[in-house]
Image: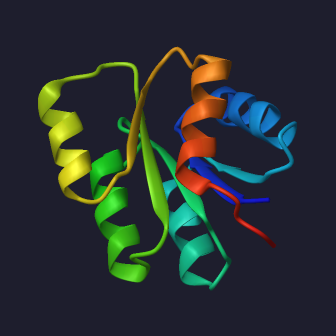
């Protein structure tokens, strides 16, 4: 299945997403620090999907998305936000985010959107 990186400034959100997606057979790597998440990708770890919160500690999810795009154009990206606006959605999609999910996280919606993004990723 897919290797999924989750970056959210709240560890509980990353743990929740990991619990939901691990049950579907995915390998999930939760992070709360932007630098650690970006280093994980920069170090050559395979990531099929990055799930990024819009509001983080030091950077915005948009800024992290920009950095990911500089390293790897092939990683699919889903943005998370508790504060959806048309502008942030447009910005994320223009930078190559494939999906947008609103908090609080709905388990079924998350599973469906992830399945739609990753298809049949094989190890």
State the residue in front, 10 or 120: 120
Could you tell me which quadrant the C terminus lies in? bottom right
- In the image, is 123 to the left or to the right of 113? right
- In the image, is 40 to the left or to the right of 59? right
Q: Position of residue 16 (x, y in %)?
A: 73, 28
In the depicted structure, whether residue 84 falls above or below residue 90: above
- In the image, is 113 to the left or to the right of 3? left
Residue drawn at x 25%, y 47% as measured from the top left: 92
Residue drawn at x 66%, y 34% as measured from the top left: 11
Could you tell me which quadrant the N terminus lies in? bottom right
Q: Position of residue 15 (x, y in %)?
A: 75, 34
Quadrant location of residue 14?
A: top right
Number of labelled discs?
A: 0
In the depicted structure, whether residue 80 falls above or below residue 75: above
Quadrant location of residue 19?
A: top right
Q: Position of residue 47 (x, y in %)?
A: 62, 68
Q: Position of residue 23 (x, y in %)?
A: 87, 36
In the depicted structure, whether residue 55 falls above or below residue 46: above
Q: How is the image coloured?
A: rainbow
State the residue in front, 103 or 48: 48
Residue drawn at x 37%, y 49% as measured from the top left: 58
Residue drawn at x 27%, y 22% as measured from the top left: 84
In the depicted structure, whether residue 50 falls above or below residue 100: below
């Amino acid at each position: 299945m897919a290797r999924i990186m989750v970056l959210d400034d709240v560890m509980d959100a990353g743990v929740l997403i990991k619990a939901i997606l691990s049950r579907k057979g995915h390998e999930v790597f939760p992070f709360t620090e932007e630098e650690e998440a970006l280093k994980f990708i920069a170090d050559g770890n395979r990531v099929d999907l990055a799930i990024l919160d819009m509001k983080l500690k030091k950077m915005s999810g948009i800024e992290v998305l920009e950095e990911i795009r500089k390293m790897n154009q092939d990683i699919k990206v889903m943005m998370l936000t508790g504060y959806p606006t048309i502008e942030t959605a447009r910005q994320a999609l223009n930078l190559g985010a494939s999906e947008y999910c609103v908090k609080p996280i709905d388990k079924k919606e998350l599973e469906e959107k992830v399945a739609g993004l990753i298809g049949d990723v094989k190890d």
